[in-house]
Structures are given as structure tokens and as C-alpha cells.
Image (cartoon, rainbow, N blue to C red):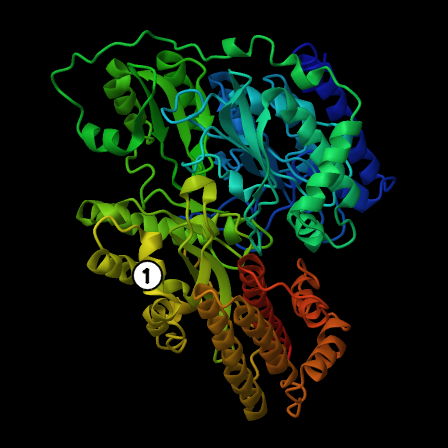
């Protein structure tokens, strides 16, 4: 008798609707194999089920240990190159507001061990990711998740992504009220909802219980809710301020208040109305302009608000809008143990240092939240199982993931803290310094992401080791800084809202690509992502540790009493910040003098090298481009100076000029006699590089070129802080794309 399939074994344990959806997906896999389902349709289908392709040119983990990406067993399918069938991919798993149970953690451990590379990775949206998953294994993986009430539905694709929430919700001393039941209700309501199936791009939602902290990063989301209580007819009511139009990405936007003091019974229908407006009016053809932030910028916040009001009034009634509110006051977590005071006379070694950074006193007397710091967001299957066992012993089902890629244990009694620390330490999860400069955030970078330019995980891994070794020597003001890194400009590592952020790019020296990171300074993590930093200059990847030491050392020397890092950067000014970084920019020795500069962190290979043209003619062209593009970079910096001083028209014009100079530099590699006339520059750029798609890269296509074309033909210009800030971001990205285009061209010569 043959063994039962997972579908048969788990038939009675899966929610019926979820089981049906998985069956449909399994059928679509079969149809695609037979060539009966269009690849584009299947791609969106699998993305909406959480199944991504991933990168394989690296083959190294951040610590230099080879992954199984190069020798993972084949599923026997033979398809064309660069398809989902050729190699294992990534599975993203939704964890609404980060809530996990020990049973769910056990299942995730099993799946990581059986289908993946034995690593459970936590993302900056509180999701779980498993890498090196074969597409054939995904239906059974989904069924095993469904049996413990976890779904991958709409974890990716043009849909509502995982709804995030503060990991301290319900136990925070500063919150208005617990947002957990609201985040849960909205998750269930929007999952698979017909009104979210026709989006042009992804849609991210977040909840926060307060304005002042960063736990929810509401201002960086497409839709955000900040909890409020307000008086109405003499009665204190629960409600939310609703924010719309936020987003990090290539050009970050801060969400703006759409509505204030929205009563709790209206937050679901308003989410539905906003979704309908986005689906109806949002961009569909040009994915680069398809987020809701671009729609709001296009029609204006007031016009958008009117459209939302109109939809809200016309919505057909749905009982689910308020059904979850019945008995919501009883939506509370149950501690496993009663509160008790510690009676130990001897404390475990290292306990007090760990307690200082990793333990948060809940508002409920006698209980604590413990942060389990996970460097790079990773833990092994074995560690996950041990953590599940520890949780059952001390806190029950009260675990949550965080947007800083950690896990928190809630409702740990005072008396149990020493034992919890000892047991965490025994399984390699007793690291201190949570929430400090050592506790960095990083996207996957070149490890697995197809868009990665530089090794963000390798960089943060290296910085973490160095900082950990000297943590006790660092001043308190430096210890409390946040560092975040992304492998490219897309800000998946949240670099825009870090005190010190980095995003990967490259520069060429002697026609050889050298990994670099742009340094982003002045972002504000608090106040739900209160402000975004701007890139200050690109430095070689191997000099980033030295750059970090220079920045933090100068901050300590110059800061005034109680002056924050953001205030110090603002006081320093763009010119002085640039001057501080300038000694590191372009400081690259020849390859034969120090080859380490030409490889990335965690990867001993040469970063990137094409067929190098050695002839004098090619050398002169590269030299000319380098000189010309430097003018564009200088003009972009002048735009930042103008923005800082409140000269928004000048900032706008300088950013535009920077793009023109960048395009002109590229044109001069083909036509040395290009004039300075903007119309001539744009016409030749369009003819030589846009219409021919030479400027396009594989993923962004014409996105960055359109920044120049859009600004050049703009009939009406706004000269305010937001529009100037955005155009500066676009100009810097256009310059980066110009560098990349020139590199591709010279690599083929």
C-alpha cells in the first residue's frame, strides 16, 4: 500500500477554502508544465502564492559558507533558461502582525529542514522566507502551513502584502490601545477580497499603537493606522488616524494623514474604499508609477480623499465590517505563568548586559518582553525547535516577529528571566545588544535577490562583528544608533529611515567594476519613520567600516548635550557631510596593489569584470565619461544644498540640470560635439539610449530614463519641499543608471 500524500494526511486539518486554493495552484503548476497556461499568467499566480525566483550567481552565504544553490537536487524538469523550473526559488510566508505560536514555529522548522537550506529568515515585514524551494514542493509546503493556520496567499504579487504591526501591541506602556485585533481583522477581511485583485502594484499596510515610536513604521506604508482615543458626545471612543501614500523604494514618499479620528467600526470599510480607488485609478501599464503614492501625487490628496468618500458612501453593507468588534475587549493574551519576583542570589554570567538591551518591562506588572536578536534575521531549524520548546515552557503561545528581523517573547515573568536567558544562550540565541547599533537590518542583497548590486548581508555581517567586539568602548550615543543596509536603491533594508543607511551600487576604476555603497544620513526611525535621509556620497564597499568609524567618531566629538544624530547631521549641513566623506570617495587602489577592493564582503571573487578594452581610444572615452559624470554628481549635490536651505526652486532646477549633465556625459561617449541645449540633450538621449533601450536594464527597464523625460516636458512645476526632495532622489537614481549603462557598454567593447 502506497504512503499517503500530505494532501490526504492533512485533509481534515486545513481550512476548506485554503485547501481549495492550494489545489487550484497545484493544478496551475501542472497546466504550466504542459504549456497550457501562459507564463505571465502563471508568474503572477505563483507570486500571489508567495513563490519567487531567486538569484544563483553568488553561491555563498554571508559567512562565506557555500550554500546548496549550486548542487541542490534537480526536480528533473527541463525548461528554458532563467525560469522558475531551472532552480529552486524562495517561498514567502505571511505572518500577520508577526504573531507566531510554538506549533507554527515547529512546522516552519520542519519545512526549512526538509525543503530548504535549513535556515528560517525573518523579513522587514515580519514575514518568514525559506530559500532554495523547488516549485514542485510548494503545494505540499503550503498544505503543511495551512494545517497550522498559516498562509502564503498574497505574500507577493500585486496584492495586499503582510499587514505589519507593533510587536509590543497589547503590552506597550505608551500605546493608546492594543491594535492586534484590528490588524487581524483587516488581514482576514482583505485576504482574497475581490476589491484587491486588480491592483497595478503591491500594497502595504501597517498598524501602530502610538505616534512617537517606530515599531509600526506607519509613515512608510501605502496605508497606515495610528491608534487614537477621542471624545464623542461625552464618550471616549477608540479610533485611528489613517495615513496613505507612504513608501520607501527607489524614491521614498512619506504617508500623509487622510482622515483623523476614524471610529473603529469604520476602518475596514475605509480600507475597502481606498482599495477600490487604487484599483480604479491607479496606474496599470507603467509598473514604475503604479504604487498608490504616485496616484496621490498625480491627483492630489484632496482629490484622492473625495474619491475615497464617494466610494465609502457607495459600498454595499458587509457585516464583517463590525462583526469582529463584538467582544473585542476580551481579545487579550493569556500568560502561561503568574507574575512572580525573582529569588535568585546568583545571576548567570552576562545576564545584566543582556537584560539592559533585550528586556522590555510590560505595562502588566511582573511581565517582560524578551527580544531574541537574530543577526541578519536568520535562525536554524534546530534553533527554531528549541525556541518553540522554550516558549511552551515559559510563555505559552506569545511570540512575534519584528520589522527589525528579530523575534520577541512576550509575557515572560520576572522570575523566569534568568532561566530564559540561560536557555537562549545554550541554543545560540542569547545575544545581547538588541535595538543597538549592532542590531542591523539588511535585505538579502546579492545573496539571493535578483536585483541586488552589492552584498548588503555581507556588509552588515562584517560591521556587526567589528562593532560587537568593541561595543563596551562605544559611547552610549553611538550604541543607540540604527544602521540599515540595502543591496540596491530599493530600500528593502529600510536604509532611508536609518540614522546611518547604506545602499549598494558600483563604480568603475580602470574599466573594472568596484562594489560601492551610497551613504544615507539623517533618516529618522522614531515617529513611525518620521523623516527620510538623503544619499551623501558613494564609497568603496571595503571602506565602509572606516567611513562608519569616521562618522560616529566625529559625532561623539562634536555633538552638543542631548543632541540627536539627526539634529547633528542637520546642523553639520550637506557641504560639511560631503567633505567628511570625500576622502573615501574614489579611494580605490589598482587591482594589482590591493585586489580586495574589487570583491565584495563574503565573496572572494572579482566583483564584476567584462572584456576590458585596453586601447587608448577606449581609455580616453572612459576618462571623458568619468570627468563629465562628476559634473552631474556635483550638480546633484548642489540640489541637496538648496533643499537644505529651503530654496526649493533652485533645488528642483539643479536636480534637473544634474540629469541633463548625466545624459550629456553618456551621449559624449558617442558624440563628442553634443551641445548644452536641453532639448538637444534630451532628443539625442532619447534617440541613442531610450528608443534603442540601451539605457534599460533587465529589471527597471526605462524607469530611470523617464525621470529625465518627465521633468523635461513638464508643463507645470511645483517648487515645494516634497517635490524638490523627490526630484533629487530621481536625479541621483538617474545618475546611478547612467553609470550602469556606461559600464554595460564598455564591457562589450
Q: Which residue lies under the disc numbered 1?
A: 571
- Where residue 590 appears, as percent x and y from the top left, is 39, 78
Residue at the image position 67 percent from the left and 13 percent from the top: 9
Closer-to-camera residue (82/574): 574
Residue at the image position 28 percent from the left and 14 percent from the top: 366
- Where residue 583 appears, as percent x and y from the top left, is 33, 74
Closer-to-camera residue (417/293): 293
Tell me the element at label 1: helix
Q: For the N terminus, which image quadrant?
A: top right
For this orientation, the residue located farthest to the right is 36
Q: Quadrant of residue 215?
A: top left
Closer-to-camera residue (446/335): 335
Q: Is residue 190 above or below residue 592?
A: above
Q: Is residue 243 above or below residue 315?
A: below
Closer-to-camera residue (3/651): 651
User: Can you see residue 386?
Assistant: no
Residue at the image position 70 percent from the left and 36 percent from the top: 274
User: Can you see residue 412?
Assistant: yes
- Where residue 712 appears, as percent x and y from the top left, is 69, 72
Residue at the image position 45 percent from the left and 13 percent from the top: 333
Q: Quadrant of residue 625?
A: bottom right
Q: Mark 1, residues whose alpha carbon is within 10 Å: few (<14), some, or many (≥20)?
A: few
Q: Is residue 644 above or below residue 382?
A: below
Q: Quadrant of residue 306?
A: top right
Q: Is residue 132 left or right of residue 705?
A: left
Q: For the C terminus, which image quadrant?
A: bottom right
Q: Is residue 412 above or below residue 270?
A: above
Q: Is residue 569 left or right of residue 415?
A: right
Amino acid at each position: 500500500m502506497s504512503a499517503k500524500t500530505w494532501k490526504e494526511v492533512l485533509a481534515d486539518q486545513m481550512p476548506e477554502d485554503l485547501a481549495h486554493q492550494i489545489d487550484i495552484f497545484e493544478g496551475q503548476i501542472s497546466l504550466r508544465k504542459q504549456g497550457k497556461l501562459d507564463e505571465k499568467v502563471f508568474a503572477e499566480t505563483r507570486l500571489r502564492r508567495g513563490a519567487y525566483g531567486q538569484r544563483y550567481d553568488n553561491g555563498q552565504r554571508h559567512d562565506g559558507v557555500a550554500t546548496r544553490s549550486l548542487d541542490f537536487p534537480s526536480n528533473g524538469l527541463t525548461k528554458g533558461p532563467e525560469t522558475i523550473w531551472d532552480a529552486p526559488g524562495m517561498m514567502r510566508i505571511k505572518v500577520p502582525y508577526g504573531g507566531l505560536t510554538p506549533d507554527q514555529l515547529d512546522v516552519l522548522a520542519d519545512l526549512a529542514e526538509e525543503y530548504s537550506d535549513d535556515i528560517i529568515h525573518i523579513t522587514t515585514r515580519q514575514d518568514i522566507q525559506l530559500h532554495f524551494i523547488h516549485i514542485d514542493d510548494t503545494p505540499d509546503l503550503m498544505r503543511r502551513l495551512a494545517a497550522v493556520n498559516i498562509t502564503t496567499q498574497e505574500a507577493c504579487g500585486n496584492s495586499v502584502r503582510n499587514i505589519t504591526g507593533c510587536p509590543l501591541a497589547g503590552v506597550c506602556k505608551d500605546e493608546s490601545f492594543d491594535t492586534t485585533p484590528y490588524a487581524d481583522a483587516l488581514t482576514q477581511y482583505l485576504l482574497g477580497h475581490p476589491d484587491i485583485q486588480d491592483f497595478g502594484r503591491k500594497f502595504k499596510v501597517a498598524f501602530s499603537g502610538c505616534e512617537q515610536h517606530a515599531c509600526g513604521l506607519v509613515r512608510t506604508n501605502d496605508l497606515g493606522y495610528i491608534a487614537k482615543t477621542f471624545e464623542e458626545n461625552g464618550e471616549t471612543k477608540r479610533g485611528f488616524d489613517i495615513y496613505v501614500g507612504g513608501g520607501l523604494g527607489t524614491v521614498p514618499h512619506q504617508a500623509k494623514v487622510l482622515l483623523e479620528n476614524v471610529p473603529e467600526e469604520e476602518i475596514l470599510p475605509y480600507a475597502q474604499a481606498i482599495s477600490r480607488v487604487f484599483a480604479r485609478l491607479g496606474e496599470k501599464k507603467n509598473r514604475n508609477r503604479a504604487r498608490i503614492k504616485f496616484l496621490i501625487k498625480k491627483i492630489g490628496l484632496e482629490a484622492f480623499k473625495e474619491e475615497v468618500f464617494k466610494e465609502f458612501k457607495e459600498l454595499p453593507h458587509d457585516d464583517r465590517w463590525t462583526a469582529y468588534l463584538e467582544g473585542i475587549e476580551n481579545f487579550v493574551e493569556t500568560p502561561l505563568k503568574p507574575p512572580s519576583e525573582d529569588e535568585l542570589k546568583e545571576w548567570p554570567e552576562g545576564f545584566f548586559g543582556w537584560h539592559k538591551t533585550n528586556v522590555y518591562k510590560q505595562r502588566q506588572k511582573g511581565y517582560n518582553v524578551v527580544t531574541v536578536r537574530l543577526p541578519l534575521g536568520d535562525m536554524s531549524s534546530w534553533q527554531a525547535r528549541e525556541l518553540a520548546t522554550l516558549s511552551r515552557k515559559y510563555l505559552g503561545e506569545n511570540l512575534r516577529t519584528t520589522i527589525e528581523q528579530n523575534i520577541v517573547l512576550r509575557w515572560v515573568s520576572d522570575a523566569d528571566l534568568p532561566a530564559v536567558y540561560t536557555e537562549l544562550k545554550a541554543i545560540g540565541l542569547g545575544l545581547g545588544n538588541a535595538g543597538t547599533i549592532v542590531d542591523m537590518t539588511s535585505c538579502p542583497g546579492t545573496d539571493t535577490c535578483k536585483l541586488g548590486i552589492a552584498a548588503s548581508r555581507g556588509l552588515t555581517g562584517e560591521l556587526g562583528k567589528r562593532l560587537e567586539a568593541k561595543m563596551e568602548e562605544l559611547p552610549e550615543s553611538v550604541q543607540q544608533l540604527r544602521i540599515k543596509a540595502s543591496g540596491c536603491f530599493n530600500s528593502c533594508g529600510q536604509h532611508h529611515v536609518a540614522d546611518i543607511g547604506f545602499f549598494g551600487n558600483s563604480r568603475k576604476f580602470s574599466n573594472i567594476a568596484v562594489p560601492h555603497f551610497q551613504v544615507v544620513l539623517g533618516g529618522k526611525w522614531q515617529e513611525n519613520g518620521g523623516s527620510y535621509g538623503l544619499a551623501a556620497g558613494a564609497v568603496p564597499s571595503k571602506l565602509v567600516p572606516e567611513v562608519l568609524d569616521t562618522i560616529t567618531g566625529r559625532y561623539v566629538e562634536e555633538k552638543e548635550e542631548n543632541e540627536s544624530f539627526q539634529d547633528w547631521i542637520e546642523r553639520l549641513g550637506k557641504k560639511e557631510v560631503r567633505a567628511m566623506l570625500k576622502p573615501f570617495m574614489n579611494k580605490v587602489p589598482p587591482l594589482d596593489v590591493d585586489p580586495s577592493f574589487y570583491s565584495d564582503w563574503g565573496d572572494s571573487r572579482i566583483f564584476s569584470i567584462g572584456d576590458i578594452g585596453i586601447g587608448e581610444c577606449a581609455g580616453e572615452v572612459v576618462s571623458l565619461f568619468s570627468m563629465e559624470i562628476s559634473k552631474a554628481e556635483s550638480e546633484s549635490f548642489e540640489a541637496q544644498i538648496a533643499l537644505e536651505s529651503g530654496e526649493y526652486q533652485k533645488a528642483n532646477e539643479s536636480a534637473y540640470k544634474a540629469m541633463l549633465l548625466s545624459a550629456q556625459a553618456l551621449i559624449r561617449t558617442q558624440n563628442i560635439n553634443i551641445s548644452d541645449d536641453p532639448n538637444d540633450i534630451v532628443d539625442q538621449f532619447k534617440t541613442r539610449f531610450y528608443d534603442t533601450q540601451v539605457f534599460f536594464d533587465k529589471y527597471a527597464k526605462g524607469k530611470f530614463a523617464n525621470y529625465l523625460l518627465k521633468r523635461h516636458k513638464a508643463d507645470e512645476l511645483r517648487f515645494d519641499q516634497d517635490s524638490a526632495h523627490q526630484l533629487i532622489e530621481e536625479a541621483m537614481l538617474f545618475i546611478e543608471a547612467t553609470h550602469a549603462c556606461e559600464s554595460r557598454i564598455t564591457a562589450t567593447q
